[in-house]
Image (tube, rainbow, N blue to C red):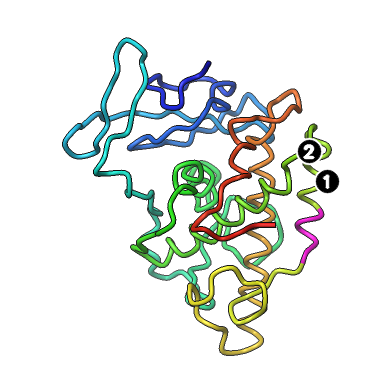
Amino acid sequence: SDPIFSSNILTSPSQFHSPLYFPPSLFLLSNQNHQQSNIYELRFFFRISRNKLGFQLNSSAQTLSLSSPHRDMVYHSSFVDDEGVDRACGCPLLPLKSHIKGPAPVSDQDRTDIVDEAITFFRANVFFRNFDIKSPADKLLIYLTFYINVALKRLEGCRTLAEGTKAIINLGLENVPVPGEAGFPFPGLFVIPQSNKEAELFRNYLKQIREETSGRLLSVAYRPNGTPNKWWLAFAKRKFMNVITR
């Protein structure tokens, strides 16, 4: 069986579908030889430091185990400098690598965006009940982590990529609440909009980023042959920050 923690460096798209990892540093790579549904390739570079990170290497099994007292280290967004970025409800409207219509500025295709971070960090961050917010971008990361949790719950039981795509499309058709409205998952995380214009701006941004996240999530939740990736769909049973998804 596959180890939960691996010290191997991931070098091919098929290896991206391996089980859960907690790498100290992660780098998203784009593979131009594959279609959009399979562009993600992760290479995890481990910096083993027993004192700082609490990782221990078992060389015989080539696995990593995480030792206390550092199990409370969540992964934070790197977008700490949001100077010049528009905001709505206290949330930075960060650029996205997306062709989906919406208020988000367009990011360069070769740069990591907040959606990349949310997907990359999800299988680590979803285990935490508390999240120490370091920057406004962390608030968006929290929202996206929760949304990925919801999306995986909808994909649970979808045995083919076609079924999963249909479930994600139906999720995208649902109403997207903003702070102050019923159904918004984290009261107090964002500021209540001060006008209808601000509310609609934030709603449209959330719609855009949810749709973009859904498309990229499908490319990792299902293998290239269209079958479910159990190392992702198993996380449908998790409850991020103890919030129940439906």
The first of marks 1 and 2 along the sequence is 2
- Callout 1–callout 2 Cβ contact below 8 Å: yes
User: Could you say which quadrant of the image residue 194 lies in?
Assistant: bottom right
Q: Nearer the viewer, residue 136 or 81?
A: 136
Magenta residue check for 211: no
Magenta residue check for 171: yes
Give, as a single range, the part of the protein colored magenta: 170-174
Q: Nearer the viewer, residue 220 or 124?
A: 124
Q: Which residue is mark 1?
A: 166
Residue 23 numbered tag: none
Residue 3 in percent (x, y) is at 46, 21
Q: Which residue is mark 2?
A: 158
Q: Nearer the viewer, mark 1 or mark 2?
A: 2
Check the image and report above or below for 120 versus 97. Answer: above
Q: Secondary structure at mark 2?
A: loop
Q: Residue at x 65, y 53 (%)?
A: 150
Q: Residue at x 55, y 52 (%)?
A: 239
Q: Nearer the viewer, residue 161 or 94?
A: 161
Q: Nearer the viewer, residue 169 or 197?
A: 169
User: Could you say which quadrant of the image residue 61 lies in?
Assistant: top left
Residue 5 in percent (x, y) is at 41, 26
Q: Residue at x 57, y 55 (%)?
A: 96
Check the image and report above or below for 127 versus 234. Answer: below
The C terminus is located in which quarter? bottom right
Label 2: few (<14), some (14–19) or many (≥20) C-alpha neighbours in 10 Å:
some
Residue at the farthest bottom position: 195
